[in-house]
C-alpha cells in the first residue's frame, strides 16, 4: 500500500532534526508519514479519549453558523505579530524550509502569515506551545441524518467469519483499514440498498471508542447513507464489532486487540484508486477528460446539496472493473447549509488556498482539489511532489497555474484553460462544478474517450498481476 498522500499533520521535531542534519528536509517527509501519520492524524480527528455515550444532542454534533467577521479576527495567532521580521517569527527549521523552497526574503516577509499557517499545520511541534489559529468546526451533518445513521449501526447477526469469509487487505487511509470479503450472509434488515447480485464487498474498519471517533464515524456513515449517485461509492450497511467479538473470533485489529470497531460495508471498487492508475498507465487527453467529467458529476450532486467532500485526491477516487469512476471516503464531508466553515484540513498537496490562509471556505474547495487530481494524471503525481511545504505556500500565494504542463502535447489550449478556471486562488472566482460540466474540454473530449478508460483498466490489471 502506498503510504503517500494521506491527510496528515507531520509534527515530529526529532525526525526533522535528523533530516536537517542529512540535508534533505522534505525528501524524508514520506518516511515520517509512515511512522507518524496514523498517530498524528488520529489526534487531528479524534483528540479526545472520553468514552461518554454518543447522542445527537452531544455538543460535538452542534455547530453554529459561521460569522465571517468573527472568523477574520479569530484566525490570528495569539501573541504573534506578523509585522515583525520573518526570521524572528519563524522557527529556524521553517526558515530552512523557506530557503529550500527558494522563497526570497521579500516573499517570506510579504507572506509571513501564510508561511506560519503552513508551518504550523505541517510541523506543529516546532512552534511555541499553544501557538494556534482559531480551531475551526468539526464536520457538520444535520441532526436528523446523524440520528438516522446511529440507528443503522447493527450487531453482527452471525459470527463475522461466516458473513465475509477470510478478508484480504485492499487499502489503508489515515483513518481506516479497508478489506475485501465475500458475501456469504447478508443481514435481514438495513441492507435494502444491497443488490442480491453483489458477490464481494469492501469493508472499511474504523476504531470506534472515544467520543470523537464515534462522532466522526457516525458523521461519515450519515453521509454515505444519504448519498446515492452513480459516481459515489454505494454504502450497504454497518456493523459494530465489539472488542469481545474480535477476541472471540480472533480477528486481528488494525487498532490493537482491545478495541471496538465499526465495519462499514461498501461496494467493492476492484479497479483501484486513481492514484494507482497514475502510476500504471499513460493517460490520453480523452481519458483524463472522461475521468474529470465523472468526478464533476459526483461533485455537482454533492454541491447541489450544499455538501463538500473536502478530501478529494487521487487516493479517494476509485474505479470499478467496468470503468465507472466513484468518489470514496466521506470522513471530512460537511454540510455548508449553515454557512461557510473555517478549518485547515485535508491532505497537503490538494488543500485549497482559502483553507491555507485560514479563511472561511465552502464547496469550492473541492474544485481546487479536483484540478490537482486532474494535474496528477498528466504529470504523474501532484504538483511540487515531495515538497508539501512549498506546494501549500505556493497554492495560497502565487497559485498552481504555473504547474499546468503547457508543453504536454496531450493538453490542448482548451484543457489548459479548463485547468486555469479551476486553479483560481480566489474561490469566489473559481469555476463551479456546474460551469465546468459545460466546458468544451469536457463536452468534447470526454465523449470521445470511447472506452479508452477500459484499456487503461486492463493495463492496470496486467501491471498489478505482474507485480
Ligand atoms: N470501496 C472500496 N473498494 C476498494 N478499495 C477501497 C474502497 N474504499 C477504500 N478503499 C481503499 O482503502 C483506502 C482507504 O480508504 P478510505 O475510505 O479513503 O479511508 P481513510 O478515511 O482512512 O482515508 C483507499 O485509498 C482505497 O485504496
Ligand atoms: Mg482516504
Image (cartoon, helix red, strand yellow):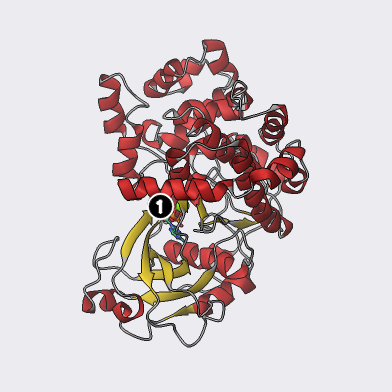
Quadrant of the image occupied by residue 82: top right
Position above or below: 446 against 29: below
Q: Nearer the viewer, residue 357 or 310?
A: 310
Q: Where is residue 356 in the image (x, y as percent from the top left)?
A: 57, 35
**Mark 1 residue element:** loop
Instruction: Tell me the residue that label 1 is attached to.
Output: 173
Q: Can residue 86 be seen in this view?
A: yes
Q: Position of residue 421 (x, y in %)?
A: 72, 34
Quadrant of the image occupied by residue 95: top left
Q: Position of residue 9 (x, y in %)?
A: 42, 41
Q: Where is residue 419 in the image (x, y as percent from the top left)?
A: 67, 33
Q: Which of 88 and 298 is in front in this view?
A: 298
Q: Residue at x 52, y 11 (%)?
A: 105
Question: How many numbered marks have been drawn onto this rendered protein structure?
Answer: 1
Q: Which residue is drawn at 56% across and 81% down?
A: 192
Position above or below: 279 against 152: above
Question: Where does the C terminus fall, quadrant-wise?
Answer: top left
Q: Is residue 81 visible?
A: no
Q: Nearer the viewer, residue 409 or 275?
A: 409
Position above or below: 322 against 386: below
Amino acid at each position: 500500500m502506498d503510504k503517500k498522500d494521506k491527510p496528515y499533520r507531520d509534527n515530529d521535531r526529532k525526525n526533522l532534526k535528523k533530516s536537517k542534519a542529512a540535508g534533505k528536509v522534505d525528501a524524508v517527509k514520506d518516511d515520517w508519514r509512515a511512522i507518524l501519520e496514523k498517530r498524528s492524524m488520529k489526534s487531528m480527528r479524534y483528540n479526545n479519549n472520553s468514552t461518554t455515550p454518543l447522542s445527537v444532542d452531544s455538543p460535538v454534533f452542534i455547530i453554529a453558523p459561521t460569522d465571517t467577521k468573527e472568523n477574520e479576527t479569530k484566525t490570528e495567532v495569539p501573541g504573534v505579530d506578523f509585522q515583525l521580521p520573518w526570521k524572528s517569527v519563524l522557527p529556524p527549521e521553517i526558515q530552512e524550509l523557506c530557503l529550500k523552497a527558494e522563497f526570497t526574503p521579500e516573499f517570506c516577509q510579504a507572506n509571513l502569515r501564510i508561511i506560519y499557517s503552513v508551518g504550523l499545520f505541517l510541523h506543529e511541534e516546532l512552534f511555541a506551545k499553544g501557538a494556534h489559529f482559531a480551531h475551526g468546526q468539526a464536520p457538520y451533518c444535520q441532526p436528523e441524518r446523524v440520528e438516522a445513521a446511529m440507528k443503522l449501526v447493527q450487531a453482527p447477526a452471525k459470527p463475522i467469519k461466516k458473513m465475509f469469509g477470510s478478508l484480504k487487505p485492499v487499502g489503508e487511509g489515515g483513518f481506516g483499514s479497508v478489506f475485501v470479503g465475500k458475501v456469504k450472509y447478508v443481514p435481514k434488515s438495513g441492507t435494502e440498498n444491497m443488490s442480491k447480485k453483489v458477490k464481494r464487498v469492501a469493508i472499511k474498519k474504523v476504531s470506534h471508542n472515544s467520543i470523537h471517533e464515534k462522532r466522526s464515524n457516525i458523521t461519515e456513515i450519515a453521509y454515505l447513507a444519504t448519498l446515492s449517485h452513480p459516481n459515489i461509492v454505494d454504502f450497504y450497511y454497518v456493523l459494530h464489532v465489539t472488542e469481545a467479538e474480535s477476541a472471540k473470533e480472533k480477528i486481528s485489529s488494525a487498532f490493537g486487540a482491545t478495541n471496538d470497531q465499526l465495519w462499514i460495508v461498501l461496494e467493492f471498487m476492484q479497479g483501484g484508486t486513481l492514484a494507482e492508475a497514475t502510476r500504471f498507465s499513460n493517460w490520453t487527453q480523452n481519458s483524463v477528460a472522461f475521468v474529470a467529467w465523472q468526478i464533476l458529476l459526483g461533485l455537482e450532486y454533492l454541491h447541489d446539496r450544499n455538501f463538500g467532500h473536502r478530501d478529494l485526491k487521487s487516493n479517494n477516487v476509485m474505479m470499478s472493473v467496468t470503468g465507472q469512476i466513484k468518489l470514496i471516503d466521506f470522513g471530512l464531508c460537511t454540510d455548508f447549509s449553515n454557512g461557510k466553515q473555517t478549518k485547515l484540513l485535508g491532505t497537503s498537496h490538494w488543500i485549497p488556498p482559502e483553507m491555507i490562509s485560514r479563511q472561511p471556505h465552502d464547496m469550492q474547495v473541492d474544485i481546487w482539489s479536483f484540478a490537482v487530481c486532474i494535474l496528477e494524471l498528466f504529470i504523474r503525481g501532484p504538483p511540487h511532489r515531495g515538497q508539501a511545504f512549498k506546494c501549500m505556500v505556493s497554492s495560497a500565494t502565487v497559485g498552481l497555474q504555473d504547474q499546468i504542463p503547457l508543453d504536454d502535447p496531450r493538453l490542448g489550449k482548451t484543457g489548459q484553460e479548463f485547468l486555469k478556471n479551476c486553479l483560481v486562488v480566489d474561490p469566489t472566482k473559481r469555476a463551479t462544478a456546474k460551469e465546468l460540466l459545460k466546458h468544451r474540454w469536457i463536452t468534447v473530449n470526454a465523449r470521445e474517450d470511447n472506452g479508452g478508460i477500459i484499456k487503461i483498466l486492463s493495463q492496470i490489471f496486467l501491471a498489478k498481476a505482474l507485480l
